[in-house]
Amino acid sequence: MMHLKLVTFIVLITLSTSCSFNGLFLHPDPIPFDTKKVSSNDGVDTTVIFFNGDTHQPVFVKNGKDTLELNYTIESVMFSSTSGNKLHGWFIKPKDIVPDLTILAFHGNAGSILSQYTLMLPLVQKGFQVFIFDYSGFGFSGGNATRQNVLKDGNSALDYIKSRPEALLTKLVIYGQSLGGHLSAVVAGQREADIDGLVIEGAFSSHDDIAAHSAGFFGRLMVREMYSAKKNIRTFHKPVLVIHSSEDGVVPFEFGKILFENANQPKLFYEIKGRHVYGPKLYADSICFKITSMLTSQ
């Protein structure tokens, strides 16, 4: 009888708190919709970003006076998600280069586009065009940050980028980092026909795996999986590149190996060094080469 009461108690606690575990995975940095400017300081210069219009089109100003001349363009857009929320995204394109590859970027579990887009800039500077967006509750995107909404938002972002004529003329790859890497495997498994390849960097293998890593047995017990990268990636049969740093202090290296083991051929594992999801900043040349090679070898 005592054992039954204990089991019942655990089940009730699990059901009542599983939604609260969104906070374990999602740490959004919301930006009030009427925000007109934000500033950042890199220790040398202060950059102010001014936002114009309903789409929050950014203008970058250095030290309060000089508009920055960028070697890429940013088109700021708002689009609808099946989550019911309006999402904010940036379509970043290199100047003076006609890209032949589009990357749909799924960023990590914290911050917003303003802190995440620089991780993709090295790929833009190598000639790729990148669409990066904020999930519900992040940045200027409306709604609440939940794992259910994240999955709906990922699929909706794919729908949006496929509606853009300049993306239809190119190969399309999902590049997911950290939580976005987990999400990318799930969306790729559901939407294989809509993309040409998948890149996963610094991702965990499932929600309950990373919960167990953080909180042991009770972490695995308390988290409802909902969807799992290591399961969904088994249904994807196009090229996969898994990138993981052996020095990653956030997501264990072994999780990248688990994802790779569950992926189908053709696949490639790229072990790198350096901090969590800093691959494009440290290894842009080799990452771009590997992406291009895996697509041309199909």
Image (cartoon, rainbow, N blue to C red):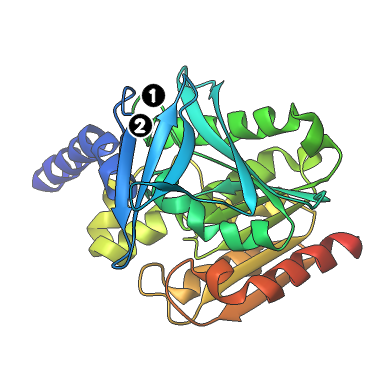
Determine whether label 1 and label 2 are within 8 Å by CB: yes
Of residue 197 and residue 284, the one placed in the foreground of this image is 284
- Choose top left, top right, bottom left or bottom right for residue 163: top right
On screen, residue 233 versus residue 166, left or right, reads left
Of residue 62 and residue 89, the one placed in the foreground of this image is 62
Could you tell me residue 160's position as x and y percent? 66, 28
Of residue 212 and residue 238, the one placed in the foreground of this image is 238
Specify the amino acid type for callout 1: Gly
Name the residue tied to disc 2: 137
Observer able to see residue 28:
no
Q: Which mark is residue 182?
A: none
Name the secondary structure under disc 1: loop
Could you tell me residue 80's position as x and y percent? 55, 20
The residue at 55%/52% (across/down) is: 229
Name the residue tied to disc 1: 142
**Crowd tier of the residue under label 1, counting other residues whose Cα lies within 10 Å: few below 14, some 14–19, many 20 or above:** many
